[in-house]
Amino acid sequence: MGQVFEMASSIVEVKNLKKYFAVERGIFKKAKGVIKAVDGVSLSLKKGQTLGLVGKSGCGKTTLARLLGGIIPPTAGEIIYNSQEISNLHKDIQIIFQNPYQSLNPKMRIWDILLEPLVIHRLSRNRERKSRVVEMLKRVGLDEECLLRWPIQFSGGQRQRISLARALILEPKFLVLDEPVSSLDLTLQVEIIELLKNLKRDFNLSYIFISHNLSVVRQIADQIYVMDNGKISEKIF
């Protein structure tokens, strides 16, 4: 089982990280082999930088994103994280998913979606929460009037802005961005990329930006790794 430790030089250091899934067949679900979704990945992310991760569909990018976000446990390896409060790991690390149409609860108004993380982590007093929610919504380019609306009333680009507001309201130290613009048209892609650059500067964030599109990653990344068959096959710069 992988472990999370403190490290001063980098915000995240991944060492020989692995995630294997058993292949089960037959009525008794006997193990017939393993899928090596992530197979010995090592990489380092420094504070304030953006690490780009590129690869074709099925190469293990999304599995790696889920490992880094703590959604699934690793089979082996280490994720070394620069935090004094390991218990706050899930607050410090947030994930933005590929499909903004599925990442927001359709039964919740935007106000409740943005408020929920503050309630779960017991952040801010009740009277302070509204101003924090409104401020974060404005930081991603949306107005206060959006708070009483439902996710279905927004476009894909607007929903991705709401997802960013929900993640940033916890004041994380870095974001894992899993194909955050792939479902958007070219104009919206440019807008969201520029927004991510501005948010990174304003909030002193670090990103891991995952995509199948190298040209998109080049617009934002300080260094780029290529992933293939669960492994890092190349570092571009």
Image (spheres, rainbow, N blue to C red):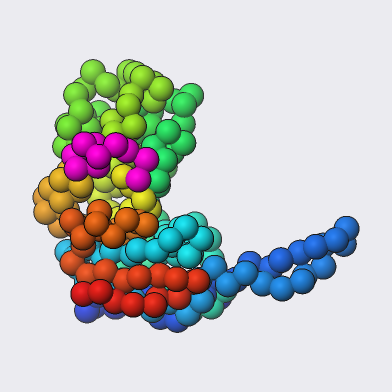
**Where 5 sits versus 111, above or below?**
below
Q: Is residue 16 left or right of residue 126?
A: right
* Residue 218 seen in the figure: yes
Query: Which of the 4 image quadrants contains residue 237?
Result: bottom left
Give the magenta-colored segment's residue range: 182-191
Can I make out residue 117 in this image? no
Whether 153 is among the magenta residues is no
Q: How many marks?
A: 0
Q: Quadrant of the N terminus?
A: bottom right
In the picture as drawn, the residue positioned furthest to the right comes out as: 27
Where is residue 198? Give x, y as percent: 12, 48
Question: Could you tell me which residue is drawn at 76 percent across and 64 percent down?
Answer: 24
Q: Is residue 122 placed above or below 24 in the rendered structure?
A: above
Up-down relation of residue 212 to residue 1 (above or below): above
Magenta part, dominant SS: helix
Q: Nearer the viewer, residue 46 or 93?
A: 46
